[in-house]
Image (cartoon, helix red, strand yellow):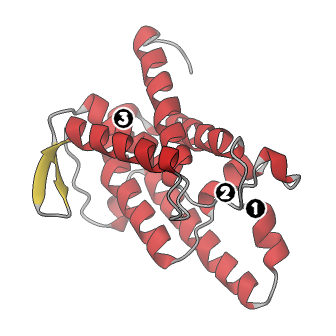
């Protein structure tokens, strides 16, 4: 199954509104920080449990915060690329459940690790990537827009790379365990749905 939107208005409802909210949050954050209001934006980002600055709402709000424009762009590009297919395949309700389970799960995993602030939809996006590979394992994804690779191998490669970078502790300021957490919670939810295909959750 493939989905090719003809324009922004043709995007499925959840994907469209998630992109809009992320863009508004990014612009709002930019304006606030230009005014020196870092306390507000910092309270919406995700802190580790050990920091003393963790609040329960951060498990949701951090998904709508981004460090810079390129961070926002690539996350929203992946949300568009994979989210459109998944929302049309599952339904809006199930897609949103999956998206937030992955994002919140990624946040929980990352909050266990002492460190600084975490922002971005990457955990949820990695969950989408995993779902796409599980549902459409032989669909081809073009690595760097040039090299075709089957979705299942693409995701396995990304997961291994994230695990290696997370374990080695590379100083790249990327929340590798959040990415893995999003994939883990996505995997568990998909397995649950396969076992209980008619369940309400």
Q: Is residue 53 left or right of residue 44?
A: right
Q: Residue at the location (71% across, 61% down)?
A: 116
Q: Is residue 91 visible?
A: yes
Quick one: label 1, few (<14), some, or many (20+) residues within 10 Å?
Answer: many
Q: Residue at the location (67% across, 77% down)?
A: 28
Could you give the CA–CA distance between mark 1 and mark 3, rounded to whole angstroms? Answer: 27 Å
- The residue singled out by tag 1 in the image is 44
**CB under 8 Å between discs 1 and 2:** yes
Disc 2 on helix, strand or loop? helix
Quick one: label 3, few (<14), some, or many (20+) residues within 10 Å?
Answer: many
- Residue 188 percent location from the top left of the image: 49, 23
Q: Nearer the viewer, residue 58 or 9?
A: 58
The picture quadrant where one finds residue 175 is: bottom right
**CB under 8 Å between discs 1 and 3:** no
- Residue 46 percent location from the top left of the image: 72, 55
* Badge 3 or badge 2: first in the primary sequence: 2
* Badge 1 or badge 3: first in the primary sequence: 1
- The residue singled out by tag 3 in the image is 131
Quick one: label 2, few (<14), some, or many (20+) residues within 10 Å?
Answer: many
The picture quadrant where one finds residue 132 is: top left
Disc 1 on helix, strand or loop? helix
- Residue 103 percent location from the top left of the image: 57, 44
Q: Is residue 77 left or right of residue 64?
A: left
Disc 3 on helix, strand or loop? helix
Q: Residue furthest bottom?
A: 35
Q: Residue at the location (36% across, 63% down)?
A: 77
User: In which quadrant is the N terminus drawn?
Assistant: top left
Q: Nearer the viewer, residue 161 or 11?
A: 161
- The residue singled out by tag 2 in the image is 62
């Amino acid at each position: 199954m493939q989905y090719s939107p003809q324009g922004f208005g043709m995007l499925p409802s959840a994907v469209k509104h998630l992109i809009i909210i992320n863009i508004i949050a990014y612009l709002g954050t930019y304006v606030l920080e230009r005014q020196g209001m870092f306390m507000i934006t910092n309270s919406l980002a995700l802190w580790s449990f050990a920091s003393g600055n963790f609040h329960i709402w951060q498990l949701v709000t951090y998904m709508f915060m981004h460090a810079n424009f390129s961070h926002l762009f690539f996350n929203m590009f992946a949300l568009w690329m994979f989210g459109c297919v998944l929302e049309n395949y599952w339904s809006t309700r199930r897609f949103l459940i999956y998206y937030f389970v992955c994002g919140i799960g990624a946040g929980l995993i990352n909050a266990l690790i002492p460190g600084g602030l975490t922002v971005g939809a990457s955990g949820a996006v990695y969950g989408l990537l995993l779902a796409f590979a599980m549902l459409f394992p032989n669909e081809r994804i073009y690595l760097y827009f040039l090299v075709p690779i089957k979705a299942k191998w693409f995701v396995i490669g990304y997961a291994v790379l994230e695990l290696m970078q997370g374990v080695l502790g590379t100083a790249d300021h990327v929340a590798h365990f959040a990415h893995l957490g999003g994939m883990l919670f996505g995997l568990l939810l998909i397995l649950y749905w396969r076992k209980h295909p008619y369940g309400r959750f």
